[in-house]
Image (tube, helix red, strand yellow):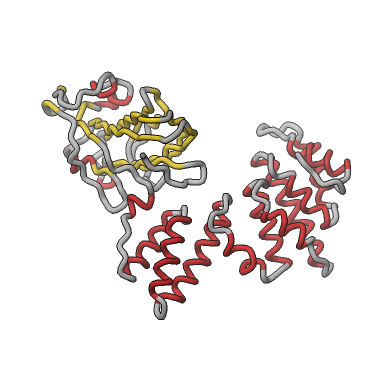
Amino acid sequence: MYLSAGASADLADSLATINGVDKDGRGHREAMAAYKAISAQSADKLPDILKGMNDAGPLATNWLRSAVETIVARELAGEGKPPVDQLNQFVLDTSNGARARRLAYEVLQKADAGTYDRLIPGMLNDPSLELRRDAVTFGMQQAADLAADKPNEAIAKYQQLLVAARDLDQIQAIADQLKELGRDVNLPKALGVIADWKVIGPFDNTGGIGFTTPAPPEKEFNATAAYVGKTGDVRWTDDIAIDDFGRIDLNKTVEMLKEVTAYGRTIFVSGQARDVQFRLGTYNAAKIWLNGELVFASEVYHSGEKFDQYIAPAKLKKGENVILLKCLQNEQTQPWAKYWRFQFRITDELGTPITSK
């Protein structure tokens, strides 16, 4: 942990004690004493305390957030002012952790009413998703103000925001505004959702056996072969049903059945070997293999569905990567259990879409 030259040894020790508390609470008594010592620090030590959050776990972060809030409240009550210049530098330094930078920004807002207008517009590509979201909100208001008299400028602004946005609600709202201005948006493409799949099924999942029992697609790929499925012979098909959000509807692509399994297969071409995130949304149990290696498994049915519901780390190799996705439907017949679909994309750690070459 890097602290400024002006940070005291006592503060450094207290921060180390706070960060030393483990998830089972060991070190809690020492951390309580350290928390009191940190909370008693003067406001000029706020940047050093915030730096202590950079490598902190969730428990230590809560301790340090509370200490920062205590110091700020005491300072403002005494008509003092936190060190605005140093906090401003801390927020702008993207090597600091996202949580610490966000807290520093919140402190700045309390000390300087112009913080939002001064900092947020420049954060469209910020690694802090919270600050980025604020910047997109700011830009959306700017675009809305332009729409009536300068529609072309509004369109350009919305298109810029569409690239920067990471939250589905903002992306949808931007797409809606562009549509009102006469520009349609391909949402699946904007979201980076993979829509180019070969699909095969249904195979049997009676009693949930399909989750652990390999069907032929897990053993081989033969684009022209016929396999014994649950209701007859099945073959790979490119005729898939995709909705406005890039979800693959297996009830339409395969057949509306219960206790069944289907597979999707796609080739993703990467320009380099790289770490990525696989992001899946589905109501159904699912497994994902990358180049034959299992990277994700969830035997959960109908607990809800949301965008980027499941996130799994993966490593692409340079060139072609084979992704095999298994999606399973169970026996439940309630109306909310009818869905059999998935939505899949590949991103970096910030949710930036990565597309196949």
Please tell me which residue lies in front, 134 or 316.
316
Question: In the image, what residue occupies the spot 66% across and 46% down?
Answer: 95
x and y, in percent, of residue 132 in the image: 54, 56
Question: In the image, what residue occupies the spot 45% across and 35% down?
Answer: 312
| Residue closest to the far bottom | 149
Q: Quadrant of the C terminus?
A: top left
Q: Measured along the vertical axis of the image, is residue 166 above or below residue 183?
A: above
Question: In the image, what residue occupies the spot 83% across and 56% down?
Answer: 44
Quadrant in the rendering for residue 214: top left
| Residue closest to the far left | 232
Please tell me which residue lies in front, 269 or 280.
269
Q: Quadrant of the N terminus?
A: top right
Question: In the image, what residue occupies the spot 21% across and 45% down?
Answer: 241
Q: As drawn, is 306 to the left or to the right of 31?
A: left
x and y, in percent, of residue 212 in the image: 33, 22
x and y, in percent, of residue 127 in the image: 57, 49
Please tell me which residue lies in front, 272 or 18.
272
Image label count: 0
x and y, in percent, of residue 282 in the image: 34, 41
Q: As drawn, is 189 to the left or to the right of 135?
A: left
Q: As drawn, is 327 to the left or to the right of 157?
A: left
Please tell me which residue lies in front, 20 or 221.
221
Quadrant in the rendering for residue 309: top left
Q: Measured along the vertical axis of the image, is residue 88 above or below residue 279?
A: below
Q: Measured along the vertical axis of the image, is residue 267 above or below residue 352?
A: above
